[in-house]
Image: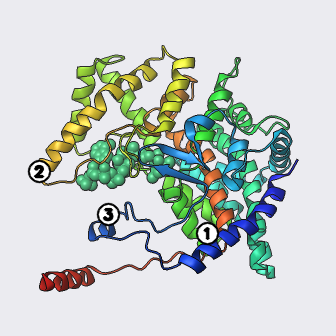
Amino acid sequence: MATLQDTLKVKIPGYRDEKRKLIKEFGSHVISEVTIQQAYGGMRGVKGLVCDTSVVEPDKGLIIRGYPLMEIKDLWPEDIFFLLLTGELPDAESKAALQREFDRRSQVPDYVWDTLRGLPKDTSPMCMLATAILVMHRESVFHKWYSRGMKREDYWLAMFGDALNILAKLPVIAAGVYRIRYEHGSVMHWTHGLDYAGNYANMLGVADPEGSFAKLMRLYLNIHADHEGGNVSANTCHTVGSALSDAYYATSAGLNGLAGPLHGLANQECIGWILELMERFGGVPEEEQLEQFAFETLRSGRVIPGYGHAVLRVTDPRYESCHAFGLQHLPDDPVFQTVDKLFKVVPDVLGRYSDERVADGKNPIANCWPNIDAISGSLIYHYGVTEFEYYTVLFSVSRVMGMLAQLILNRAIGTPITRPKSVSTEWLQEQVKAVSAKA
Ligand code: NMX
Ligand code: MLT
């Protein structure tokens, strides 16, 4: 049995060597070019960042350390965290050792609960979660060791300590946010010996006699954990961490990005949109009614939440994994059935709308297929967690795993401070002038 920390100790010299060798031998090799469109367009498609935890292939979706998501969807979050960091799956003892680490670090300081209870009653759950993590900055191992003067090669170890502490407390805090915000009674505590997702399910307080909500939580926390390095939450966490801000600052910042409607908040926007349309049509709508509603949404200037993606060009395999869960556990649920019907209608509506946009001189919609947020909320809703303003917190409990794995690895290989060069519009105009003069 090798613990996660021991495995990392063995692997990290290799990670460092790979980086050194690539830079030394091929440092000037060109891997990407940038157009003016991309410079104004959120750097879409620009390859300017390295992330080894996972890749997202436009035509395949998420691949974690070589494993396509659908092959590993039934693993537990503990397995995924181990895999993200090391490229290996833990054996039963290594996994149990990691669970014991979480057991011993799961106590949440009282001041976190005092802070959360002191916030205005209508504070958003995401604001509560990001605040709780930020306020724990004073616990940071990295911050303490750095203030005393730490060697660069130990940065990852300090970050690893912070990561385990944050991860162990995160489900307790996230469940506490739910119970405080929606007045579901006192906060619940971590159960030693119970797995990570099982603990979260339990502390939310959802009645789960057959254990299928815990199963959903295992799936949910697995599939949302990582989506390579360029998504807003991971990239924000990475940028903040690159200044050697500790894991509390960096994770909290990443979560603030996840809280945006074009990113993680889309899961709650989506369920809100579905409930609105079900109310309008009095239950599971007909396909024509869905088409009408989707066009109304688009014509009012809004996006259809849960559809489209910056990288993907096919149905998100995370969507497919949730769909398989829904078919098995809740095939008769009306919200799930509506999600299913939307899948038959929305891609075509978006395609037609995209053609209209192009005819009007606007950008096409690059991807008309559903992403994870189109479906995840319907599964949660089924189990009675109906306060959907909370759903991005569920996404967060998972995504923090990916953010922290990337943070540890970046400190391990000594990734420097992020600082791309920006250019002015005037500079771009000058470049274009020079090009047209040559033509
Ligand atoms: N509904 C309506 N319009 C859309 C949609 C959509 N679902 N997706 C893209 N477009 C528009 C987009 O707003 C843009 O318009 P404009 O040029 O006027 O600004 C145009 O199509 C081109 O955008 P794309 O190149 O297709 O997409 P981009 O990479 O810029 O954005 C998203 C990706 C995910 C932000 C975008 O597809 C979107 O807003 N989707 C709905 C929100 C959502 O589901 N977000 C969750 C993403 C996944 N996650 O888990 O974080
Ligand atoms: C994510 O999981 O981060 C989203 O799908 C967004 C992205 O990859 O850009």
Q: Secondary structure at mark 1?
A: helix
Q: Which residue is mark 1?
A: 241
User: Is residue 107 left or right of 414 when viewed as pictured?
Assistant: right
User: Residue 272: horizontal and vertical position, in percent?
Assistant: 40, 34
Q: Amino acid at mark 3?
A: Gly
Q: Nearer the viewer, residue 123 or 225?
A: 225
The vertical placement of 200 against 437, above or below, is above
Asked whether mark 1 lies closer than 8 Å to ligand 2, one says no
The vertical placement of 77 against 282, above or below, is below
CA gap between label 2 and label 1 equals 42 Å
CA gap between label 1 and label 3 equals 24 Å
User: Residue 157: horizontal and vertical position, in percent?
Assistant: 78, 66
Residue 354's image quarter?
top left
Q: Which residue is mark 3?
A: 41
Q: Nearer the viewer, residue 395 or 83?
A: 83
Instruction: Specify the farthest residue to the top.
Output: 332
Q: Earlier in the sequence, mark 2 or mark 1?
A: 1
User: Is residue 286 left or right of 184 when viewed as pictured?
Assistant: left
Q: Which residue is mark 2?
A: 360
Residue 196 visible here = yes
Name the residue: 39% across, 27% down. 275
Q: Residues within 10 Å of mark 2 (few under 14, many from 20)?
A: few
Q: Earlier in the sequence, mark 1 or mark 3?
A: 3
Residue 145's image quarter?
bottom right
Q: Amino acid at mark 2?
A: Asp
Asked whether mark 3 lies closer than 8 Å to ligand 1, one says yes
Q: Secondary structure at mark 3?
A: loop
Name the residue: 71% across, 60% down. 136
Callout 3–callout 2 Cβ contact below 8 Å: no
Q: Nearer the viewer, residue 301 or 336?
A: 336
The quadrant the C terminus occupies is: bottom left
